[in-house]
Amino acid sequence: MDEWVGEDRFISNSQLEALKSEGKFPANLSLPEEEPRRRRGRPSLPHDPAYEQLEREHEEATKVKNIQKIILGRYGIDCWYFSPYPDEYSENIDLLFICEKCLKYMKSEATYQSHYHRCEYTGPPGKLIYLKEGLAIFELEGEVAKLYCQNLCLLAKLFLDHKTLYYDVSPFFFYVLCEVDESGVHPVGYFSKEKASPDDYNLACIMILPPYQKRGYGRFLIQLSYEITRREGKTGSPEKPLSDLGRLSYSSFWAFELLTRLRAGSRTIPSLKEISFLTGFKEEDINETLTELGLMRQYRGQKVLNMAPKVLEGLLKPFENKKFTLLDPECLNWP
Ligand code: ACO
Ligand code: ZN
């Protein structure tokens, strides 16, 4: 949640020592060593336009938060990061109004109110591919629903630390998850996916709006991404690098899916290749997850999977009390 902070929030080594002696700070923690002065200045790099372009993009992507808060549907949401909305909408703006039907952004509440009532959109302009128990998924083509997808990327960047796609949305599909009730269709989150990925990425970027986070919607969309991958007859993995929240969500998803399958499967130990075929996960993601779970053992120089029912049950325990909606593949109308 980037913000400028005052000097009063900095602490010096001597203040730290004082706090430690008063027992107000753990004694074993220390501030990082000061970097030697000679390493500070910028290295003098040769003039390279490609490098300078990269620098500019990086600077743009990592700027300090410019919009403090948005109003979207029934929610007021504090923003986390900078997003490259046009200057007119982001310079010295505390509040930006966003129409939840078309994602158009406006500075004034009056404009927003009158737009909202005249807005012709009812929901994301794409194909409805899933509808069950008040949850809908729309598949949009960046090339076709260009403005909506650009607006979606601008909105998503408010909650994504690192992301460079904002305007060139054509090479992507967008899967937008919505809650549907009598008052309308309310966007919850989305993921984007390259139409063709040479690296077998099956998800480029995922975001769930903060009011809907930690309710299993991220998991739901990740499940969708693999369901599509399986139907394509492929295996896939999310685009790297993952954010901290992205990593947590994927680790939890992979662990739950693999444990559930291993528990339900036959007693013969499957190979990574077989698991990969069944799940659509990449072998390296499976290997990493099973290793993290402590299920891979070295036996006579080979890695062996531990499938003891008791161990699997134990690892599945923490998931049991969690209530999350699972995607019902029967209701997915894709392709
Ligand atoms: N703290 C701790 N654990 C968390 C948190 C959190 N704030 N958020 C999610 N998790 C873990 C949960 O433990 C959960 O696992 P569990 O069921 O074992 O407890 C798991 O992640 C999935 O939780 P969901 O509720 O399904 O996740 P959510 O709906 O909140 O969406 C997402 C996750 C999309 C990453 C969301 O946090 C988000 O939009 N973050 C901002 C944008 C972002 O970082 N996107 C990922 C970028 S990487 C990429 O796009 C390839
Ligand atoms: Zn609108």
Image (cartoon, rainbow, N blue to C red):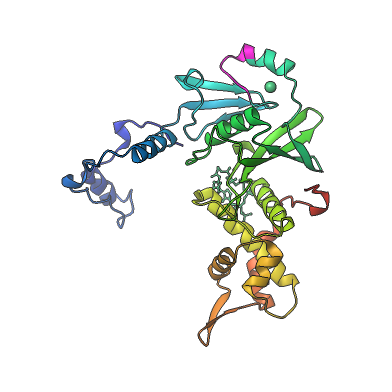
Judge left or right: residue 298 versus residue 124.
left
User: Residue at image x 30%, y 55%?
Assistant: 27
Residue furthest toward the left?
38
User: Residue at image x 58%, y 30%?
Assistant: 77
Instruction: Point out residue 199 in the picture as x, y percentages from the top left corner.
Output: 55, 55
User: Residue at image x 61%, y 36%?
Assistant: 170
Judge whether residue 203 can be spotted in this image: yes
Instruction: Point out residue 280 in the picture as x, y percentages from the top left corner.
Output: 67, 61
Judge whether residue 322 can be spotted in this image: no
- Check residue 295 for magenta coloring: no
- Image: 234 above or below 273: above
- Quadrant hosting residue 253: bottom right
Instruction: Point out residue 119 in the picture as x, y percentages from the top left corner.
Output: 72, 19
Query: What range of the chain is rendered magenta?
Result: 104-111
Instruction: Point out residue 204 in the picture as x, y percentages from the top left corner.
Output: 58, 46
- Image: 184 above or below 210: above
